[in-house]
Amino acid sequence: MHRRRRHCLFLVAALLMTVMASANYGWAQTNLPRLGIIVTGTAHDPPGRGVRLNAIRRALASHGWIEGQNIEFEIRNARGDLTHFAELAADLVRARPDVIWADSAPAARVTYAATRTIPIMAFDFTTDPVAAGYAENYYRPGKNVTGVFLDAPQFAVKWIEFLQAIVPELTNIAVLWDPNPGDAHVRALEKVAPSFGIGLQVIEVREPQDIDAAASSFKTRPEALITLPSPMMLAENTRLVRLTKSLRLPSTSIFPFFAEAGGLIAYGPQRDSANDQAAALITKILRGADPGGLPIERTGVFELVVNLKTAKALGLTIPGDVLVRADRVIK
């Protein structure tokens, strides 16, 4: 009898140890820091993947964050359809991650609208964070948002400088602008253009089909074209290049893919470097830093891409001082 009782007690103890071990394992798994990621994505993104998500994973891995090992991801990907983006952000906030990587101007906007408490790291190339109300100032944001933002006035100057160097008689530029992310870039262009003797024709393009119809909105034929950044413009890169080719206009964009696909030049932030800045901010927040005390960062490394094949097709000569500044030349 005593032997049977000892055997039963042994089985009960073994069962309890198994249950406790399982509970502790589960606790260890769920006790990993949790990063929310919300991206605009494209319609071609597979679930949980895509160009931006892969780039984010690489940047985080370079700072030691490996999914499933020492961090968990909560991903919301709009896959190019922003009609329900606010719902995705609200759903992400309900999951209560420790910090959120908001990977575009629309992502930052809907995420900030959904939470004032969860830290947000905004990766946003089209918004002035102070004007948008995300931050009290650049040096001490004071709220739950910090991030990597673009210096719109600086880029406005560079785009015009490069185009005018290639087309010295340039006086009339058409600007394709998607208003959805905000007006920081178009305001910057309107401010600096007069000092270059440049007149602007700003054409709003809210939907992809508006790009095809843009030429019908020109008051006079422009001598060059600037396409301002937005998630829609990035997704419609091929359509934009097709428009500039059909109009035979020297053109520029922030995205290197634009020049790679046949646009004349592209000047913008080097994406891997900006991703690294963002991952460094995420690391600081996960280690306890208050986003309100982390200075907002500007992109610091830039890339100029020149397409000589397009220049030849347009009958243009790229000056030597532009070529020497190019990081890549497509021949």
Image (cartoon, grey):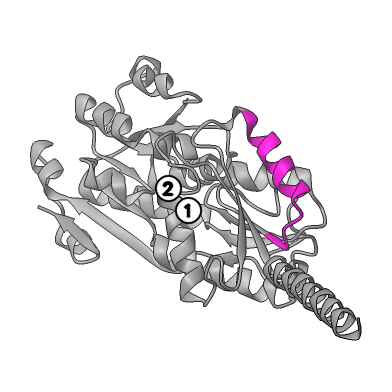
* Amino acid, disc 1: Leu
Instruction: State the residue at coordinates (20%, 63%).
Output: 321
* Distance in Å between CA atoms under marks 1 and 2: 5 Å
The answer to which of 18 and 330 lies nearer the viewer is 18
* Amino acid, disc 2: Gly
**Label 1 neighbour load within 10 Å: few <14, some 14-19, many 20+:** some
Q: Is the C-beta separation of discs 1 and 2 under 8 Å?
A: yes
| Looking at the image, residue 257 lies above or below residue 201 | below
Residue 286 vs residue 204: left or right? right
| Looking at the image, residue 45 lies above or below residue 6 | above
Q: Is residue 222 visible?
A: yes
- Per the picture, the main secondary structure of the magenta-coloured stretch is helix
The answer to which of 72 and 119 lies nearer the viewer is 72
The answer to which of 52 and 219 lies nearer the viewer is 52
| Place of residue 173 in the rendered image (x, y in percent of width and height, measured from the top left) | 35, 34
- Name the residue tied to disc 2: 50
Instruction: State the residue at coordinates (82%, 57%).
Output: 117
Q: Is residue 94 magenta?
A: yes
Where on the picture, by quarter, is residue 147?
bottom right
The N terminus appears in which quarter of the rendering? bottom right
Residue 14 vs residue 276: left or right? right
**Label 2 neighbour load within 10 Å: few <14, some 14-19, many 20+:** some
Q: Residue furthest top?
A: 216
- Name the residue tied to disc 1: 53
| Looking at the image, residue 22 lies above or below residue 159 | below
Q: Is residue 157 magenta?
A: no
Local SS, label 1: helix
Magenta span of residues = 84-99
Residue 33 vs residue 265: left or right? right
Q: Is residue 132 visible?
A: no
Where on the picture, by quarter, is residue 194?
top left
